[in-house]
Image (spheres, rainbow, N blue to C red):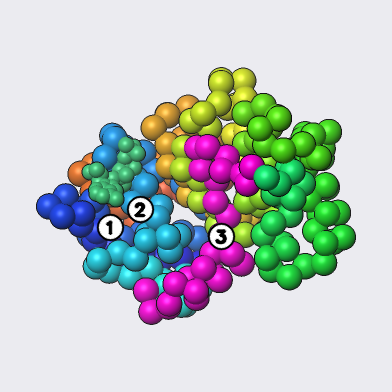
Amino acid sequence: MLQAKCLGVNYGAVRALVDVSFTIHPGDSIAVMGPSGSGKTTVLHCASGLLNPHRGTVIFNGVEMGSLKDRGRAAIRLRNFGFIFQRADLIAEMTLLENIMLPLRVLGEKPQTCSIQATSLARELGIDDCMQRKPALVSGGQRQRAAIARALIARPSIIFADEPTGALDSVNREGVLQLISQQCLSTGAALLMVTHDPDTARICQQQWRMHDGQLLNPPAQRVNSKPTAHGRFT
Ligand SMILES: Nc1ncnc2c1ncn2[C@@H]1O[C@H](COP(=O)(O)OP(=O)(O)OP(=O)(O)O)[C@@H](O)[C@H]1O
C-alpha cells in the first residue's frame, strides 16, 4: 500500500534521515521508536506526504507522492490518511461535533450525513455527551478522543500518530490506546505511530527502531504477528 525507498532528509549539516526504506501493508500496526532526534517524526512526515524527502521516493497505491504538487499530496492525505498528534489540535472556534465532521465536510458530504456519522463515532469513543462543547471546555482525554474521531471519520487507510498519548495521564493513555487499536482493527486501517514509550509501542505488531536517522531493524527482517481477541496486538 505504501512503500518508502531510500529516503534521505538533511537539515543543513544534520542528516535527519539516511537511506530509510520500508513498506506499510493494509492492517499493519507499527511503532517507530528511538532516542530524541533520531528521525522518528521526520519518517512520519515523509511517509504521510507532509514533507518531501530530499532523496528517495514514497509510493502510495502506485502513485509517487514526490511527483505530485502540494495540492495533489493534500488530496491524497485528505482521502486516505488520518492524523493524530500529541496535542489534539482541534479548531478552537468549532464544537467537537464540527471538528469531527470537518474532513467529511471538506470531502463534500452533506451536513446531515456528516453529523450522523460523527455522532455515531463519538458514541463509540465515549464523548457523545460533550459534542456541542468547544475544545477549551472539555478534558484533555475528551479532546484527544475527538481528535481520534476526526482522524477516523473519513475511514483512512493509514493512521499517522505522533506521540498520540504524550499529553495524557496514565488512565486516559490506556483508554485512548485501546480506542486507536480497536478502531484500526475494525476498519482495517494501518497505523504508523511515533512513540518514546515502550508500553505505548506494545499495542503495535511491529516495533521499528531509529538511531541517527537510520532504521535499525529493516522491515524485511521482521516477523509479523496477529492481533489478539482483546483488540491488542502481540
Ligand atoms: N525543521 C527542522 N530544522 C532543522 N533541523 C530539524 C528540523 N526538524 C528536525 N530537525 C532535526 O532533524 C533530526 C531528526 O528530527 P526528528 O524530529 O525527526 O527526531 P525525533 O526522533 O522525532 O525527535 P523527538 O523524539 O525529540 O521528537 C534532529 O536532529 C532534529 O534536530
* Among the 4 quarters of the image, the one containing residue 49: bottom left
Please report contact status of discs 1 and 2: CB closer than 8 Å, yes or no. yes
User: Horizontal and vertical percent for residue 22?
Assistant: 36, 59
Badge 2 local density, few (<14 within 10 Å), some, or many (20+)? many
User: Horizontal and vertical percent for residue 27?
Assistant: 57, 55
Q: Which residue is mark 2?
A: 43
Q: How many marks?
A: 3
Badge 1 local density, few (<14 within 10 Å), some, or many (20+)? many
Left or right relative to 84: residue 221: left
Q: Which residue is mark 1?
A: 20
Image vertical order of residue 46 relative to residue 83, above or below: below
Left or right relative to 36: residue 30: right
Q: Nearer the viewer, residue 168 or 178?
A: 168
The residue lying at 83 percent from left, 47 percent from top is: 120
Amino acid at pointer 2: Val
Task: Magenta stretch: give its range.
Answer: 66-92
User: Horizontal and vertical percent for residue 64?
Assistant: 41, 76
User: Horizontal and vertical percent for residue 168?
Assistant: 55, 26
Secondary structure at numbered mark 2:
helix
Residue at mark 2: C-beta within 8 A of ligand 1: yes
Query: Which mark sits nearer the N-terminus, 3 or 2?
Result: 2
